[in-house]
Image (cartoon, rainbow, N blue to C red):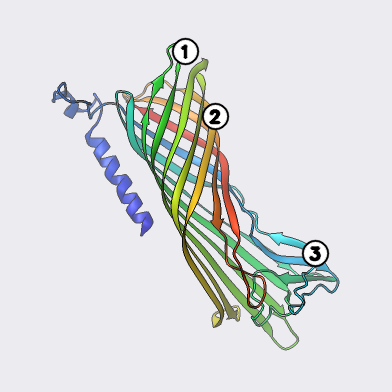
Amino acid sequence: MKRNSILAMIIALMISQSIMADECDSYCNTNDFSDCLCDPCSSWSFDVDWIWWKVRRYGLDYAVVGKGNVSIDFATEELPQGKTHYIEPDRDSGFRIAFFKGCDCWDLGIRYTHFKTNETEKLNRLAETDIFATRAQSSGDIANPGLVDLATSKYAIDLNMIDLEFGYRVDFECFDGNVRPFTGAKITYIDQSMKTIYELINASEIQDNLIEEKLDFDAYGLYCGLEGQLEDVWCKVGFFGRTSVAISLANIESQFLQYDFDGLEIQNLEVQAKNDKWCIIPYYEVAFGLQYDVCDFLCVDWSVQLGYEFHQWCDMEDFINFISTKKISRDKANLGIDGLFLRFCGSY
């Protein structure tokens, strides 16, 4: 539902842009805008980005593997000894599009970013080793003493971000370049999930537990920042950079479900925990790279940018974590995303 509303907003903006075309459009040739503050048929710009990002965060462990008789005693809260295995998401593709309308040195526009990825890890118990289930609650069928023969876990993240941005460009007089302070409103939806299956093979039966964890983040806030360009430093190649900070009011919904699972269908719900809270979340971004100005084509000034960027959400609520049969850990976690982006820019 969220994605449908976002796409509808973007399509509506694209239609309005096609109506308000530049001087190549007949609409602009047949109307006089000399009395208007700003010609609706000029000073439009758009960006289309291919992004290649990687998620960086902790708290994605799913098993501890140790040698010998590794176990846990829930009465004394002794921890297992061994190597912690966790999911490390790989790089994946996404996209970002933006449309802006300029008026003299001022501009106003919208930017939409979408990124989605998932990663799966799997462990099989080898001879002389034990696998300890880290995400199962201890009251489950196979979580006590916590040893399993197979552990499989999948992490997924779905990010959608909308920026409504207002900026003012200041051109340098001594060389070809500009700086642009900006501000705006930021709407962010980040859905994270972990799905983990633990299997214990006994002489008479196979016991499975399925753990489903969700962490939904909806944030609404304000941001400000500064970006700039140095154009045609060498053979139409220049530099650009951007940084911004934001503060958002965020609703975070977390859920933990643990089922008795036979490998084909869910049997019984053994453990259920939910949390819903509002909190203040800070955010910052940094981006920089190279820009190359391409020759004009179809009444549009084209350029290509290749850059690297960092995004960080701080002090977010983490997945629900049981540290004993009766206690829940209330951890904080930072969510970072970084990677390359390739941008095609057009303006007229």
User: In the displayed structure, would residue 17 be above or below residue 132?
Assistant: above
Percent from the top left, x then y, of residue 344?
44, 32
Q: Earlier in the sequence, mark 1 or mark 3?
A: 3
Find the residue positioned furthest to the top. Answer: 174
Tag 1: Cα neighbours inside 10 Å, few (<14), some, or many (≥20)?
few
Percent from the top left, x then y, of residue 74?
73, 78
- The secondary structure type at the circle numbered 2 is strand
Q: Quadrant of the N terminus?
A: bottom left
Asked if disc 1 and disc 3 are in contact, CB closer than 8 Å, the reply is no
Percent from the top left, x then y, of residue 279?
47, 57
Residue positioned 37% across, 21% down in the render: 296
Residue ID for mark 3: 82
Q: Which label number is shown at residue 289? A: 2
| Viewer-side label of 2, 3 | 3
Residue ID for mark 1: 175
Q: Measure how far apart labels 2 and 3 are at the Cα level.
A: 42 Å
Q: Is residue 139 left or right of residue 64?
A: left
User: Which amino acid, mark 3?
Assistant: Gly
Q: Quadrant of the C terminus?
A: top left
Q: Is residue 19 left or right of residue 316?
A: left
Q: Measure how far apart labels 1 and 3 are at the Cα level.
A: 60 Å
Tag 3: Cα neighbours inside 10 Å, few (<14), some, or many (≥20)?
some
- Residue 236 visible in this rendered orientation of the protein: no
User: Which amino acid, mark 1?
Assistant: Phe
Q: Is residue 329 left or right of residue 237?
A: right
**Of residues 294 and 286, which is closer to you in this image?**
286
User: Which amino acid, mark 2?
Assistant: Gly
